[in-house]
Structures are given as structure tokens and as C-alpha cells.
Amino acid sequence: MTTTYVLRGARPLGGEAADVVLADGIVHEITAPGAAGVPDGAVVVDAIDHVLLPGLVDLHTHLREPGREDAETVASGTRAAAAGGFTAVHAMANTSPVADTAGVVEQVWRLGRQAGWVDVHPVGAVTVGLGGDRLAELGAMADSPARVRVFSDDGRCVHDPILMRRALEYVKAFDGVVAQHAQEPRLTEGAQMNEGVVSAEIGLAGWPAVAEEAIIARDVLLAEHVGSRLHVCHLSTAGSVEIVRWAKGRGIDVTAEVTPHHLVLTDELARSYDPAFKVNPPLRTAADVEAVRAGLADGTIDIVATDHAPHTREDKDCEWGAAAFGMTGLETALSVVQQTMVDSGRLTWADVARVLSTTPARIGRVDAEHGRPIAVGEPANLTLVDPAARRTVDGAAQATASANTPFAGYELPGRVVATFLRGRATVLDGAPVERTDLAIEGAAR
């Protein structure tokens, strides 16, 4: 028996206020404020001046399990996802063992079902062991219970053009997409941060923008040649934006993502030598930040994806050169997008739904359940946000098992008040709701 929720005075997509009733896993009723009845046993949620969005979908999450449960588990990572307003995440393949077989992706998928916080959709590796030498079992992963549709060697680039072409050709058979980590390895050997004025002044090995841009340019042409779908992970430079804009103008089937941290942070932060700001791709210049914001605003960049990369204290609390690349992001993503794009007037809340829910769900081919319109009869995968709230980020207080957020001590706008997965509250009044059942209600097959 599922709980009925009445969201009083919510503003779907930031529009006019309404009462929204969730029952039996779906949006049961949408009425004028105060018009919805309250069934026996229903929970009434004060949602006045709160924005109601379709549940957020992350196309780029690292959950670390199996293999690095000391940094994150599927349970802790998806709990963090729910706290951040997400109802579905795509778990990257760089686990140990690598998610390059049907067995491993099914394990990750089942761990997600058992945890119950969000739907977990495993990303399959493109090459065996992420080694870049031969294709992994793409078809077997696609046919597995996990129904993998996104494939990526993220963390490493599929640098061999022959292998990349074969992968693009292969995934066409089951409507898959290759998500490329665009980094020419020969141009980034030993690189520690963005190549530019700051790297020269502080003496850290530079990571040139062209290392990203050269791979994107090659791959959009390969995608055009074979007629396949390409997705560009964590685009970070002004040049990359221009290449994707050109490719889309040419009709190439390419999509691209930007991370929240690349929307706001710059390479100037490396002057502190604080490894919290060490990430792959590196933080770029203020001009690059402006370019990716403009690209997101005009639709050149399709989505925001977190690249949530949890690490243990030992892997981050050390000197810059020895520290791991990566930042957590699931619990701060929506606030960063609000600050940089909504509060600045560059995106509406309807646009936020597009870049953080509808489009990533479509790219990952999970749009039968996620990223759906807020309408009667649709799955109740929803997020309720108080845009007027402000909070100071405390890494140690987050739901993720790791504290390596670059936003520690930052004041950010917005607060996720509630998250609903098929009508079941996973977050309520800003706090995760622990499950009492053993089976996920209406879990996707």
C-alpha cells in the first residue's frame, strides 16, 4: 500500500501554483490550489512557492562499487543522488572489476534495485578493462537485465580511431550511444591542471584545451561517417563548444554535457594547491566558463551531468601531484545550476527540467519513466525545490560517503525539499527517508 502525497501550492516547472496529488506511483491529480481533497492517510506537503520538477537524471555518476567501497557504494551514492533531487543515475564503468561484461553491469543494476533510492542504469565499458585494445561485450551488456544503452571508458579516452569507429558502428544495432571522455593521452602526459597563465606561474604541468578539442573534432566526424550517436562527456573549453555547435549545424547526431563545476569554478583556484580543485578535465579559464554557460543557454550543450567522483580522504588530503582527480557533485548540482543559470536569467525552471531531466533521460534511453511531463497519469518521479532557501555546503554532512566537494564553505541557493521515486518519498522535508520495505515499489524491469 503506497502513501498518497498532496503537494499544496507547488509550481510545476516554476509556473502557476497547483495542488499535485501523487498516488499509486503516478501523478493522480493536478488541481487549483486548495481544491484537492486529502484522502485518509495522505501526507500533505507544504509546497507554496516551491518549484516542482521531473526527477533529475544524471548521465554521469561514479558509484565506485564494486571495488572501491571505501570511497562510495551504490547505496551511499544513490542516497546522495536522492538528496540532490535525482531519481535516476547512470553509473560509470570504471569499477573493479570494470563493468565490461553482462555479469558486472547486472550486479550494479541489482545493487541499485536493492538500495531503492534511485534507478541505477549501468554504463558499460567500450573496451575490455578500459584498456583501449579491444571492444568489450557491448551486445551482451545491452541484452542483459541492465539493458545498457550508454557505453563509455570514462576516465580514459577511446583514443584509437579504429576502435572508436567500430564502437560507434556496433551500438547502432541496439540504439546505443558512445559517451567519449575527450582527452588525447599523448598531449596530457603528466598534466595536472589547465595549460595557461596560471599553470606557468605556479609550476604545474599544463593540460592544453586542444587535447579535448582534437578528440571531439575527430569523433563528431566519425559519428557522421557511420551515422551513429555520440555523446561528449564533461565538455570544458570554449573551443569544444564551437566544435559541437558546428557539428550540430551540420546535422551530426552529437550531444554534449557540462558539469556543474565547469559552470562556475576556474583554474585560478589551483593557486591554493588545494587538491579539492583537481579534476579531469581540469578547471579552465573564466573565458571558458562563460563559453560553456553560453553554450548551455543556447542549446549547444544539451545537459548538465555531475561527474560525481567520490574519493577517500587519503586520496585527496595530500599534495596536489599525488592527489586523485575528481569531485563529488550529486548534492550540489541543482544549486549550482540555479546560481549560474537561473538566478542570472539565462535559463528558466522549464529549461532546468530539460537539461537535468528530460534530455539526459532521452539520451540514456530511460525516458519511458524518467524526465516525463508533470501531468496526470505520468510516473511520479519528481523533485520539489525551495529556490528561496540558502545553505552553506558542509562536505562532511553530505549523504555521499566521501567529502571531496569543491564547494565546501560556499553558500549556494536552493534546497531539495522532497524527492519522489514512483510516488514513494525518498527525501522529505530535506532529509532522506529510509526504506522499511525489502522490495522497490514498481521497480523498472
Image: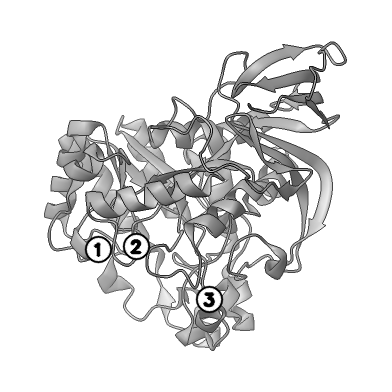
Residue under circle 2?
Answer: 94
Position of 114 with respect to 294 (left or right) is left
Q: Are marks 1 and 2 in contact (CB under 8 Å)?
A: yes
Mark 3 or mark 1, earlier in chain: 1
In the image, is residue 244 above or below residue 211? Answer: above
Mark 2: which secondary structure?
Answer: loop
- Report crowding for label 1: few under 14, some 14 to 19, many 20 or more residues within 10 A (C-alpha): many
Percent from the top left, x then y, of residue 84? 64, 48
The reply to whether residue 288 is visible in this rendering is no
Residue 261 badge:
none
In front: label 3 or label 1: 3
Q: CA distance from mark 3 to mark 2?
A: 16 Å
Q: Name the residue at 56% across, 64% down.
A: 285
Please state which amino acid type lies under the numbered disc 2: Asn
Residue located beneath label 3 in the image: 312
- Vertical order, 383 against 30 (above or below): below
- CA gap, disc 1 and disc 2: 7 Å
Identified by mark 1, the residue type is Leu
Q: Nearer the viewer, residue 62 or 239?
A: 62
Q: Earlier in the sequence, mark 1 or mark 2?
A: 2
| Side of 49 where 443 appears, left or right | left
Q: Which residue is mark 1?
A: 130
Residue 105 seen by the camera: yes
